[in-house]
Image: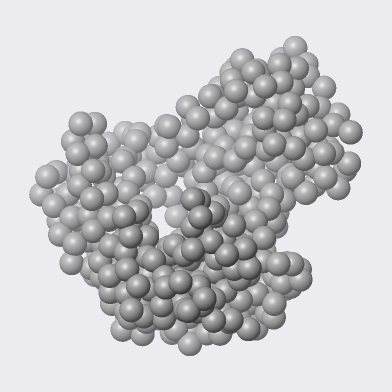
Amino acid sequence: MKKVAFYTLGCKLNYAETSTISRMFEQKGYQKVGFEEHPDIFIINTCSVTENADKKCKKIVREARKISPAGFVAIIGCYAQLKPQEIASIPGVDAVLGAAEKFRLIELLDGFAARQEAQVFASEIKEARDFNHAFSMHDRTRTFLKVQDGCNYGCAFCTIPLARGKSRSDTIANILDAAREIGQTEVKEVVLTGVNIGDFGIQNGKRKESFLDLIMALDQVEGIARFRISSIEPNLLTNEAIQFVAESRHFVPHFHIPLQSGSNTLLRKMGRRYLRELYEDRVYRIKSLMPHCCIGADVIVGFPGETEELFLETYEFLKELPLSYLHVFTYSERANTRAAEMDEAVPMKIRNKRSKMLRILSEKKRRAFYEENLGKTFQVLFEEDVDAGQMHGFTENYIRVRAKYDPLLINEIKEVSLSEINEKGLADVLEPETSLLSHG
């Protein structure tokens, strides 16, 4: 029995796909092991959102070769689709598989026997037309369920359409089947994931269903306590979807809505499909219906042409919005994107300075959001995350909490009262025996 190990870089979608591919190996009789357990085969699922992700891939290949010098190393994922020949030239790489081939790697690599030169299976991205369903199953607490793939937007800074192809989705019927399967396990929370999940519903190039149809159907699935929506574009987050989440049985009050810039000048230059006024409207609409809702945002700093004035416009916009946290990305040039050819590049020193400013702002916003919720009662899903006699979990509105360790609480949803913010910036709860009640 050959041993296979997996390593995943990047987004939740990659984790869902890695988990599904690992189950394919197990069904074929392979033994899944840890990366350090001298596997015969390494599968590295890559990301290419930033230059740093590319460097990480190369480092992981080197580590794999140290652990199992004779091991077979296969690279899949976004980096593999974008730069297959570059990866094939990395010492130690035996195979590279693109977006249309990665779910067929057991068939294509036929026994995983190394050759003198790396094998490359990476067709043009237009060949990635099929939707391959996926969900993660390695965490009994939470599952990432893939509902959509690809993107039709083509933002100036983004390589994802080049790495994953056109927008396409699973059917609601298939997703409900997967959700019911997950509902038969110990999993309590399902996170819907994809490249552009608000664009859900395109099958074989035609729109047949909608995101609202999907979440309304999932809300009726029994056996899953929580559904959480991952990142969704502001122009695709409709008023109807917001209203539905506010009134739903199982969808939690948490949205992650990419902004990228608070300057309309830069939003237009980036090729985004909204202006700051629409974004602001979405945030305040959510808060009017769900005052306790957690709202996160993606922001890019240092995009070409971002002057000090335009950056401060973004900073002030974010400062005034009732957001709960920020994911801050320092712009990096990516090959074959429009932004890479633009003038007015921002010096890296200034990019880093602005990034630091927004990360500090994010911490202030997160703390303010936590403080707003002190003394209130929430439902916490406790995880198998134990450190120094303390355990952790998340409220429905994405506040990370700490409580005294109790093995009976692991993977349980309990009602808690948030008492204070501790030295690590987490919310403490009252002692379990006095504050935690069964949630059914």
Q: Is residue 131 left or right of residue 158?
A: right
Q: Is residue 72 left or right of residue 213?
A: right
Q: Report the residue at 67% width, 22% height from top.
A: 67
Q: How many marks?
A: 0
Q: Report the residue at 74% width, 67% height from top.
A: 185
Q: Report the residue at 61% width, 76% height from top.
A: 225
State the colouring used for the structure image.
one colour
Query: Residue 314: x, y in percent?
Result: 19, 55
Report if residue 439 is visible in the image. Answer: yes
- Above or below: residue 250 compared with residue 85: below
Query: Residue 105: x, y in percent?
Result: 76, 37
Q: Is residue 334 left or right of residue 139?
A: left
For this rendering, which residue is in front, 38 or 226? 38
Q: Report the residue at 35% width, 72% height from top.
A: 419
For this rendering, which residue is in front, 328 or 210? 328
- Above or below: residue 284 compared with residue 345: below
User: Quick one: quadrant of the N terminus?
Assistant: top right
Q: Quadrant of residue 142?
A: bottom right
Query: Residue 154: x, y in percent?
Result: 43, 50
For this rendering, which residue is in front, 42 or 128? 42
User: Quick one: quadrant of the C terminus?
Assistant: bottom right
The extreme top residue here reads: 116
The extreme bottom residue here reads: 247
Q: Is residue 245 left or right of residue 362?
A: right
Query: Residue 435: x, y in percent?
Result: 47, 79
Report if residue 148 is visible in the image. Answer: no
